Image (tube, grey):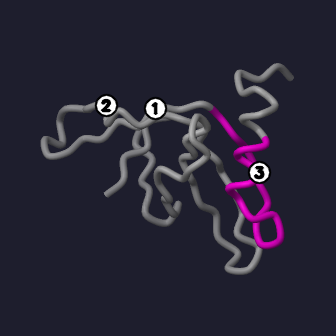
Amino acid sequence: MPSILSEEDKETVKRTVPKQTNKIQAVAVAKLYVAFPDRTTWNYTGLQGAVVLSNDLVGNTYWLKLVDVSVSSTLSDLFLRDWICTRPQAHPVS
């Protein structure tokens, strides 16, 4: 399956997620929008990169991590237990 991420970007994601304790389930390119402080309006945060869905094998939980592939750093860690899915492609964090 074709990917928007380059091989270098994929290696950056793999380096950011420790393989010993995590299993990467999916990776996709994403921009982060928030509905804050006004919950009725979505605002672009300026953060973008590769969002990683991973299974924490130690704690048996799933989490999302936004990785800035341009500088190889983690932008945001979000645990799925904090997420509420209200629409198929919008996942607001409460």
Q: CA distance from mark 1 to mark 2?
A: 8 Å
For marks 3 and 2 on the same chain, the one whose residue lies earlier in the sequence = 3
- Does residue 82 lie above or below 45 as drawn? below
User: Of discs 1 and 3, which sits in the foreground?
Assistant: 3
Q: Is residue 26 magenta?
A: yes
In which quadrant will I find the N terminus? top right
Q: Which residue is mark 2?
A: 44
The three-letter code of the residue at mark 1 reads: Lys
10 Å crowding of disc 1: few (<14), some (14-19), many (20+):
few
- For the point 57% across and 41% down, the residue is 71
Measuring from the top left, give residue 8's x and y in whole percent. 77, 34
Q: Are marks 1 and 2 in contact (CB under 8 Å)?
A: yes
Q: Amino acid at mark 3?
A: Lys
Image coordinates for residue 39, horizontal then vertical, percent: 18, 43
The answer to which of marks 1 and 3 sits earlier in the sequence is 3
Q: Secondary structure at mark 1?
A: strand
Of the numbered discs in the image, which one, if any, rests on residue 21?
none
Contact check, label 3 and label 2, Cβ < 8 Å? no
Question: Which sits earlier in the primary sequence, circle 1 or circle 2?
Answer: 1
Which quarter shows the C terminus?
bottom left
Residue 31: mark: 1
Query: Residue 60 location, x and y as percent?
Result: 70, 75
Q: Residues within 10 Å of mark 2 (few under 14, many from 20)?
A: few
Q: What are the residue bounds of the magenta stretch?
A: 11-28
Query: Residue at label 3?
Result: 14
